[in-house]
Image (cartoon, rainbow, N blue to C red):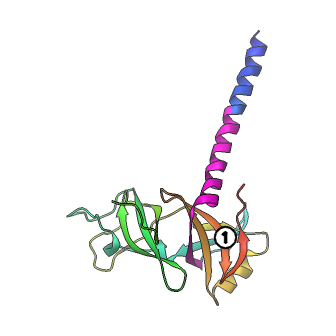
Amino acid sequence: MTGKRLIISALLLALVQIGFLGWIIAGRAAILRNGKEVLLKIEPVDPRDLLRGDYISLGYDISRIPVKLIANIPRGKETSDDTSIVVRLKKGADGYWQPTTAWFDKAPAPAGPDEADIMGHVAPGWGLREPEATITPEYGIERFYLPEGEGLAIQNDMRVRPFGMKLALSANGTAQIKALMDGDKTLFGEPLY
C-alpha cells in the first residue's frame, strides 16, 4: 500500500510540475501571439555567454528614462525605491517607438490606440531631483540569444547601421522579444513554443 501511494504521489507531483511549466510557456506564447507589436532601436553591449552561447546584450532608447518624464514622483522624494515603472510609448515617424511619459507602479489610464505601455523595474537609489537625471529600468528584454557564431558579426553590423527589436506587449505591459530586425528584414524570430 505504501508503494502505491508513493507512485501516485510522484505522478501527481510530476503532473503539477508539468502543468506549471506549461502555464509559463503558454503565457509567453500568448503574449507573442496576441500582444501589441512595437519596434525599439537597440544598441549592442556584449556578444558571448560561456554557458549559453552567443547573445546580444541590448540597450534601448527606453533603457534610460529622463526623470522629467515620470509623472507621479511624490513631492520631496529624492531617490527611487525598488519598484515597478510603466513607460508609455508612441510610434515615431521613423517606425521606432519612443517613450512619452512614465509612472511608478502603474499608469493612471490605459494606453490609447496609437500608444503602448511597457512594464519595467527600477532599482532603489536613482536620484530623482537632479535637472537632467535619468533612471535605468529593466524590462526583461535586455538579452537576445543567437545561433552559435552569429553574435560577434551582428554586434559589429550594429555599430554601422540601425537594428531594431520587435516586441510583443501584453495588456499589462509585459514584454516578450519577438524578432531581431535589420532594417525591415527579420534576422531571427522567436518561436511561439
Q: Quadrant of the N terminus?
A: top right
Q: In the rendered view, would you say 186 is above or below 71?
A: below
| Residue 148, image quadrant | bottom right
Single out the residue that lies furthest toward the front. 113
Q: Callout 1: helix, strand or loop?
A: strand
| Residue 83, image quadrant | bottom left
Q: Is residue 39 magenta?
A: yes
Label 1 Cα neighbours within 10 Å, binned few <14 / some 14-19 / many ≥20? many
Mark 1 — residue? Answer: 179
Q: Nearer the viewer, residue 31 or 24?
A: 31
| Residue 177, image quadrant | bottom right
**Visible in this render: residue 125?**
no
Single out the residue that lies furthest toward the top. 1
Q: In the rendered view, would you say 12 is above or below 48?
A: above
Q: Nearer the viewer, residue 1 or 173?
A: 173
User: In percent of the image, x 61 and y 71: which residue is there?
Assistant: 166
Q: Position of residue 179 (x, y in %)?
A: 67, 70
Q: Position of residue 153 (x, y in %)?
A: 74, 81
Query: In the figure, is residue 43 to the left or right of 67?
Result: right
Q: In the rendered view, would you say 24 is above or below 67?
A: above
Single out the residue that lies furthest toward the left. 76
Q: Quadrant of the C terminus?
A: bottom right
Query: In the figure, is residue 9 to the left or right of 44?
Result: right
Q: Is residue 42 magenta?
A: yes
Q: Position of residue 22 (x, y in %)?
A: 68, 43
Q: Which stretch is magenta? A: 16-44
**Visible in this render: residue 167?**
yes
Q: Looking at the picture, which amino acid does disc 1 mark?
A: Ala
| Magenta region, main secondary structure | helix
Q: Position of residue 4 (x, y in %)?
A: 78, 15
Task: Say how many tags the image has.
Answer: 1
User: In percent of the image, x 57 and y 75: which residue is there?
Assistant: 39
